[in-house]
């Protein structure tokens, strides 16, 4: 669906909180729905990606500390690790986490599902416009006392 066109004056008068919240709700909801098709939550997804990016480097404690600030659902990460281990997707050697072949395959399936959500979200929005939007939101966050830096 292509949104109706409005003047710059009309758009500049809009409440940013409304549009930021609406966008966040729809993006997060779409991603959570896509992940649920693979019986995953966002914390599962974050866990899989971090471990895949640094196999054998993350401990449970370090990964939980890294992911907790992004978690709005008060996730029990020990339950996430247990679930992924029970599925045969995650192994632990000397307190270091590694994905199994099945875990990597599941991560790739979830990635493909998420990519569809991202493609739908970005339809009709070029990279320059998207980057300008992200930069504007970063500045709003920083202006209000938050951290406007990109996540590490």
Image (cartoon, grey):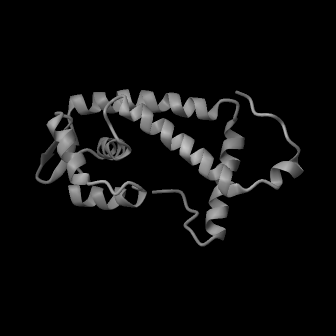
Q: Quadrant of residue 83?
A: top left
Depth order, front residue of 80/29: 29
Comparing 40 with 143, the one in front is 40
Report the number of discs: 0
Give me the residue at 33% from left, 30% from top.
Answer: 38
User: Which residue lies at the image location 70% right of the left edge and 35% below the top edge?
Assistant: 126
Residue 69 percent location from the top left of the image: 40, 61
Q: Nearer the viewer, residue 76 or 151?
A: 76
Q: Is residue 140 left or right of residue 79?
A: right
Q: Is residue 132 left or right of residue 48?
A: right
Residue 99: x and y in percent read 23, 38
- Above/below status of 2 relative to 6: above
- The correct choice, above or below, for 92 with respect to 114 in the image is below
Going 30% across and 30% down the picture, which residue do you hit? Answer: 106
- Which of the 4 image quadrants contains residue 144? bottom right
Q: Residue furthest left?
A: 94
Assign the N terminus to one quadrant of the image.
top right
User: Image point 29% across, 27% down: which residue?
Assistant: 105
Image quarter hosting the C terminus: bottom left
Most extreme residue toward the bottom, as rendered? 145
Going by the image, does 119 lie left or right of 71? Answer: right
Vertically, is 88 above or below 17?
Answer: above
């Amino acid at each position: 669906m292509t949104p109706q066109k409005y003047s710059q004056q009309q758009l500049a008068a809009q409440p940013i909180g409304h549009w930021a919240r609406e966008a966040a709700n729809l993006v997060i909801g779409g991603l959570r729905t896509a992940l649920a098709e693979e019986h995953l939550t966002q914390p599962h997804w974050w866990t899989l990606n971090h471990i895949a990016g640094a196999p054998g480097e993350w401990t449970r404690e370090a990964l939980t500390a890294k992911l907790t600030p992004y978690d709005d659902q008060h996730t029990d990460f020990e339950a996430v690790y247990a679930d992924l281990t029970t599925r045969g997707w995650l192994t632990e050697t000397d307190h270091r986490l590694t994905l199994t072949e099945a875990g990597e395959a599941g991560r790739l399936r979830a990635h493909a599902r998420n990519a569809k959500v991202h493609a739908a979200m970005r339809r009709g929005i070029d990279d320059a416009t998207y980057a300008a939007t992200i930069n504007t939101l970063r500045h709003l966050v920083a202006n209000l006392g938050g951290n406007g830096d990109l996540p590490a």
